[in-house]
Image (cartoon, rainbow, N blue to C red):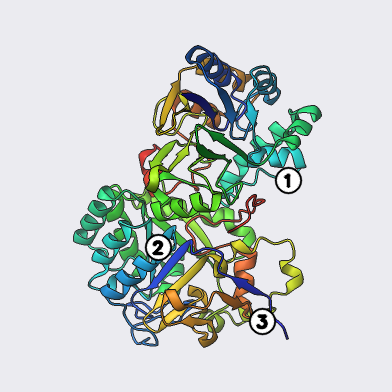
Amino acid sequence: MTRLALLGGIYSNYRALETALRMIEQRGADGIYCLGDLGAFGPYPDRVYPLLRSCGVECIQGNYDNSLAGGLADCQCGYTDPRDNYFARLSYAYTFENTSAENKAWLASLPMTRRLEVEGWRILLCHGSPRKLNEFLWESTTSDAFLEYLLRLADADIVAVTHTGIKWHRRLSAGRQFINVGVLGRPENNGLTHVVYAELSLERDTAKVEFVPVEYDFRALAADMVEEKLPPEFIETILTGWWTTCLEILPHKERARGRF
Amino acid sequence: MKFPSAELVHLDNLWFQVTGTLCNLACTHCFNRSGPQARSFGFLTLAQVQEELETAMQAGVKEIFFTGGEPFLHPQLPEMLELSLAVAPTTVLTNGMLITNRLADRLAEMERKARYSLEIRVSLDGWTEASNDALRGRGVFKQVLAAIERLCQRGLLPLVTVVRTWDEREDGAALESFGSVLKSAGYTRPRIKLLPALPLGRELERSPQSGANSSLLSEEMLEGFDRDLLMCSNSRLVTDRGVWVCPLLIEMPAARLGARLQDAAPTYELKHPACLSCYHYGTICGNVSALIEGPAELKRP
């Protein structure tokens, strides 16, 4: 059996990353992959890089990484609501300013996707979707029919993405599977403070997905964010598990489950 | 003159012009001139919807939209929405005037049972009774706010769509005003989608200057632009008179691409000023105002 740990967006949450990497070491993994968006939202962006490198985490670019590496004006999330845009810009400016030139160059060197072939399974890792870096694939707005198309497009048996911030998993025809691995960066708008990553256990005939909850010291992260003068709205999300910003992109079901 | 063209890359969005252009309102800025007497397009049957849903599912459709006219004038719309929700996330664009308690109950139940999101997009174009009703008709403001409240009471969060009839620089203040009027109507966390006024249909008469800039898209403008963002590369519209390239161009006979989805032409020439709106604002007809453009990594098959 081969076991892969698939990490979603880290959003500078180095404390959750640290905890997750410890858990992965204990549980055992044959490979650790991060699907991009290393910076954003959280404090001290440069702190995630040494952790990723020392544990040999294989990363791909997310939209945030792509923006930071290319010196783009924004994070490419495409917000139009003025309030969402305000917070997105604030967070991007902070992350841009506090990410070293060396780390930006490293981001630029990352591939946009990774292909693996494990135990006969053809796997594609990407950030948003197989066809676009920043396409949001939510559980409630992604039809089975569309997923079948994406898997054909990707020429893969398993596709794993992140980008939206909320995990989900779907089994499709001929044993193929689609996974949104969730994120380590912030809780997933459910009133719980933990974050999550996905563990993919592969054998010749079976592929099992488990979402692993990561309980980390979120209060310490909140204190870091206060220290760095990040907006109280972001800190509230870390402390309560409810999203307070960037809500316009949420489809009806995901929005209705939240508090705001 | 040679126009740039766009090819259907993938059918992400399937639209149904379910009640044609028949509407119980006659808004002064309506881009497809819908109204109580507007019969240029008629109703789709349940069988037509079912057949095209099947074709779209085979094609890997991502989302379905029902528009008009006023979709709830169709007596079988709830059945159609249920069929559609079994296939993909579904959105209905309504003026809200026909949303009674009974219908709101049914919609809420439908939403609860569905795996996919049901989005109810309700139009509101002014944050005061006077400004809204000047565009949408007398008495509409109060009735629509009551309908929104009915939906909210049942746990539904309608997407309130607002056409910008003010200067773009006033967006912030306008959104704030809409937010507070919706909150006082019982919608505690309002979802609002702002749309540009389109230089089409009755809007050309209401605001003649909107048609003054009739410039067209050129090949040069599309250089380096992600054409996947244009509706013509990701959407199709089914009407009772055939398949159109997009909901905006319904008045243009040249935008008819065929009788049914499966035989509709894949390519369209971008030769209307409305194509420019799509280019400037992204796929405005989608639920999220996607100004999203990112590098595509994979080649299409």
- The image quarter containing residue A86 is top right
Res B212 label: 3
- Secondary structure at badge 2 equals helix
Residue type beneath disc 1 = Ala
> Chain under label 3?
B
Label 2 and label 3: CA atoms lie apart by: 42 Å
> Chain under label 2?
B
Q: Quadrant of the N terminus of chain B?
A: bottom right
Front-lying residue, B236 or A116: A116
Q: Residues within 10 Å of mark 1 (few under 14, many from 20)?
A: few
Residue type beneath disc 3 = Ala
> Chain under label 1?
A
Whether the residues at callouts 2 and 3 have beta carbons within 8 Å, the answer is: no
In the image, residue B213 above or below residue B128: below
Res A86 label: none
Q: Are marks 1 and 3 on the same chain?
A: no
- Secondary structure at badge 3 equals loop
Nearer the camera: disc 2 or disc 3: 2
Most distant residue in the left direction: B102
Label 1 and label 3: CA atoms lie apart by: 32 Å
Res A73 label: 1
- Secondary structure at badge 1 equals loop
Residue marked by disc 2 = B58
